[in-house]
Amino acid sequence: MRYINRHPRKGAQIMLMLLPFVLIIAAWFIGSAVRLEANPHDKLLPGLTQMADAVERMAFTPDRRSGDYLLWADTAASLLRLLAGLALSSLLGLSIGIIAGVFPVYRAALSPLMTVVSMIPPLAILPMLFIVFGLDELSKIVLIVIGITPMLARDLEQRAREIPQELFIKAQTLGANSWTLILRIVLPQLLSRLITSVRLLLGSAWLFLISAEAISATAGLGYRIFLVRRYMAMDVIIPYVIWITLLAWLMDVALRKLHNLCFPWAEGERK
């Protein structure tokens, strides 16, 4: 049998899935043990005890100044910004994708614009956003919107253009107008694709959020990471990074479940 046709069994597949994580964790703790043995005050590779103490301090001990549990306060601030940015991006991307994908007249204007805007590095215009929208919440949300919306719009436009023209012709033959075509044919197809596109862009959304929080914020996961970096507090930074990764993974799982529940007929339900 050719190697390309060999598939792991279920037990072997689980082992292969866990193997990279086990190797990374083992390498970390071995390196940490070696460095801490040489220097008990080493901060570069903190051990499990150090990180557990940091989690206890950040998540379960009230801050002396504010009285807040910092990890949960930072998480709430970041998630509010992220969800607001994703919601606005989804609404704008879906609207532009429908208009540009269905109506050739509007496509001639919107499609080139979205192509050009999607090439602009969002982080390059972050100082402009701070100048225009201030240093508060709005600039951070706008950065996510600017970074995500053009990609969503282009993807949804392409999906709309891939819908077979026979469906439009048959619907118009039966008397459907433009609104009926959008609501009954285009929208179900694009809503399915929208969820998949948002899943693929979650990492970018988190990147824009953390970048904005690192520069100007008084709370948030990105703010806290860049605040404690000056003290080389890797025992805080690493749990925060793991927590961000876990949140992003949970959001991806939730979106996948939502996709399978709402659109079981779509190709994505097998993923």
Image (cartoon, rainbow, N blue to C red):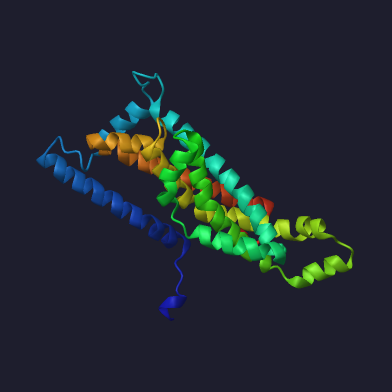
Could you say where residue 33 lies in the image, as x and y percent from the top left?
A: 18, 43
Would residue 263 appear left or right of 233 to someone viewing this image? right
Q: Residue furthest left?
A: 38
For the question of whether residue 99 can be seen, the reply is yes
Could you say where residue 95 lies in the image, as x and y percent from the top left?
A: 67, 53
* Picture residue at 30% right of the left edge, 33% below the top: 52
For the question of whether residue 233 can be seen, the reply is no
Name the image quarter holding residue 266.
bottom right
Name the image quarter holding residue 64.
top left
Would residue 229 appear left or right of 140 to someone viewing this image? left
* Picture residue at 54% right of the left edge, 58% below the top: 151
Q: Is residue 248 above or below residue 5?
A: above
Q: Is residue 72 above or below residue 244?
A: above
What is the tally of numbered marks visible in this picture?
0
* Picture residue at 79% right of the left edge, 60% below the top: 181
The C terminus is located in which quarter?
bottom right
* Picture residue at 40% right of the left edge, 33% below the top: 217
Query: Is 22 or 141 nearer to us in this picture?
Result: 141
Query: Is 237 or 264 nearer to us in this picture?
Result: 237
Could you say where residue 74 lies in the image, as x and y percent from the top left?
A: 42, 32
Name the image quarter holding residue 152.
bottom right
The N terminus is located in which quarter?
bottom left
